[in-house]
Image: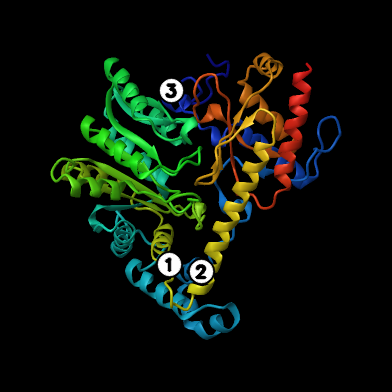
């Protein structure tokens, strides 16, 4: 019990226990400490002993936040946003063309969006601006080769908001279970904790590039059912977070067939769909339509919710909070309840909705802004791929580190094998070994990563997740130097 005198209505003992139970390691202790270090560096503060920090910059490799790590915004997107935020600029086209490089299609797009949304400072319809939903539906049709109904599109404040909405509707009681991949993005386990629902973990196969294994999924499902859990949905993250994996067409088909057989809602988290370095992105929407076409009638009632976001890919507009989810196969009465739920929050940020429209409907070949857009987009993509490869090559040279070849998303999730003495020291400090390692890495180098315990991992294994968003390679060298010194210290302890 808390020793704090009862001076206020709320204290740590009487708030919602499910909020206390939720864990979100991406912004946990390591992230907090890294911000403390950043503040000390900014103010030229010193350690208690009087010595300076052993690094001059904090690298936030713990979170997929591209523009914090110097990814530049797409010029066309920001030019359109400037006009949406301050429409009187449209009265000064000549000045903007001559002195700021604006093109005619920037003005045209801004006027069209203002005509549809009226003002980015006004509420939109709760499901989103209708014309923007139409643009999303057109994007999905172009991507998959199958029609998409704008009425099935819900614009959202990032994909996270969509996940929150869907899990609130799915989770009806403490017995409700959702199959979640391990390792996973902790948004899912944290939200299930808050909802007092059950996470049903299924392990990805690290030996098969973090692919799915249907026998493992089936065993997890059967075990949960035998224990009385009402398993209602399966989450799939493709491309993977934290693993960086990209599912094959066969993997997608197998998961859809399993969901159809067991009557499960499929939640397809596809926010990294443009971050694919090897192979090709295969959407669950296309996979489902292909099955429905091949075997008419059998898969007509599969419920699929696919999510996308402006936060990742080459857009990287995390702070503007924009995304969408598409519903396929849902009962109309359930869709009405989903609409009611989102309407409680009034509407997603309208500026974020406009960025969704720009993401799904960028300049096309022949448009005035296309050449610069293509150059910026490709430059960001190639930079990410180069840094992913450089980090992967560095991990290959580090003792006791194993890492899968980067396939997609913004992360690597290497396995680390630490000396017994390091594990013993971690236990003495009340920490997991990978958490201990990541804290020591931060203290020595200023590089903030996330221990594998924050994402879930197979028992007896240790990992950490790092982004490859930070520019340059100097910070990669910091990791290599630290790791060798750490291994040398604890091997001889």
Q: Earlier in the sequence, mark 2 or mark 1?
A: 1
Q: Nearer the viewer, residue 211 or 350?
A: 211
Q: Nearer the viewer, residue 100 or 276?
A: 276
Residue 158: where, in percent of width, then height?
A: 42, 49
Q: Give the colour scheme shown.
A: rainbow
Task: Farthest residue to the left: give it.
Answer: 297
- What separation in Å lies between label 3 and label 1 (alpha carbons)? 45 Å
Residue 140: where, in percent of width, then height?
A: 32, 57
Closer mark to the observer between disc 3 and disc 2: 2
Q: Is residue 163 rendered to the left or right of residue 290?
A: right
- What separation in Å lies between label 2 and label 1 (alpha carbons)? 8 Å
Look at the numbered disc 2 and give the secondary structure of its residue: helix
Residue ID for mark 2:
373
Query: Do the residues bearing badges 2 and 1 touch, measured as CB atoms within 8 Å?
Result: yes
Q: Nearer the viewer, residue 44 or 192?
A: 192
Whether residue 329 is visible, yes or no, is yes
Label 2 packing within 10 angstroms: few (<14), some (14-19), many (20+): many
Closer mark to the observer between disc 3 and disc 1: 1
Q: Quadrant of residue 50?
A: top right
Label ID, residue 17:
3
Residue 377: where, in percent of width, then height?
A: 52, 63
Q: Quadrant of residue 434?
A: top right
Residue ID for mark 1:
362
């Amino acid at each position: 019990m808390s020793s704090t005198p009862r001076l206020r209505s709320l204290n740590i003992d009487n708030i919602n226990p499910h909020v206390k139970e939720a864990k979100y390691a991406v912004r946990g202790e390591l992230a907090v400490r890294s911000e403390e270090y950043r503040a000390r560096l900014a103010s030229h503060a010193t350690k208690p002993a009087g010595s300076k920090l052993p690094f001059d910059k904090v690298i936030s490799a713990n979170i997929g936040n591209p523009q914090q790590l110097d990814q530049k915004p797409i010029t066309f997107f920001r030019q359109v946003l400037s006009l949406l935020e301050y429409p009187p600029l449209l009265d000064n086209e000549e000045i903007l063309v001559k002195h700021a490089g604006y093109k005619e299609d920037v003005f045209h797009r801004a006027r069209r969006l203002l005509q549809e949304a009226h003002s980015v400072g006004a509420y939109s319809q709760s499901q989103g601006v209708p014309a923007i939903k139409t643009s999303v539906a057109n994007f999905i049709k172009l991507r998959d080769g199958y029609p998409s109904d704008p009425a099935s599109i819900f614009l959202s404040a990032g994909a996270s908001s969509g996940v929150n909405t869907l899990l609130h509707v799915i989770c009806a009681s403490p017995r409700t279970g959702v199959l979640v991949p391990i390792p996973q993005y902790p948004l899912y386990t944290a939200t299930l904790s808050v909802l007092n629902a059950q996470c049903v973990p299924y392990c990805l196969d690290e030996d098969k590039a973090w692919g799915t294994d249907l026998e493992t999924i089936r065993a997890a499902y059967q075990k949960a059912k035998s224990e009385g859990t009402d398993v209602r949905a399966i989450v799939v993250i493709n491309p993977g977070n934290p693993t960086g994996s990209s599912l094959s067409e066969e993997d997608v088909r197998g998961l859809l067939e399993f969901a159809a057989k067991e009557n499960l809602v499929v939640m397809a988290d596809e926010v990294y769909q443009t971050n694919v370095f090897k192979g090709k992105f295969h959407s669950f929407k296309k996979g489902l339509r292909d099955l429905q076409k091949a075997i008419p009638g059998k898969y007509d009632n599969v419920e699929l919710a696919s999510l996308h976001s402006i936060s990742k890919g080459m857009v990287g507009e995390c702070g503007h909070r924009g995304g969408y989810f598409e519903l396929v196969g849902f009962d109309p009465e359930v869709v009405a309840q989903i609409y009611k739920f989102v309407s409680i929050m009034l509407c997603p940020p309208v500026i974020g909705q406009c960025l969704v429209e720009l993401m799904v409907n960028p300049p096309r070949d022949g448009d005035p802004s296309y050449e610069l857009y293509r150059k910026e987009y490709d430059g960001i993509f190639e930079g990410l791929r180069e840094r992913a490869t450089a980090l992967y090559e560095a991990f290959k040279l580090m003792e006791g580190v194993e890492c899968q070849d980067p396939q997609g998303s913004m992360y690597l999730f290497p396995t680390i094998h630490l000396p017994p003495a390091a594990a013993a020291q971690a236990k003495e400090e009340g920490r997991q070994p990978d958490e201990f390692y990541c804290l020591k890495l931060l203290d020595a180098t200023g590089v903030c990563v996330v221990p594998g315990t924050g994402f879930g991992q197979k028992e007896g294994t240790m990992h950490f997740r790092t982004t490859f968003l930070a520019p340059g390679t100097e910070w990669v060298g910091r990791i290599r130097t630290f790791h060798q010194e750490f291994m040398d210290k604890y091997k001889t302890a």
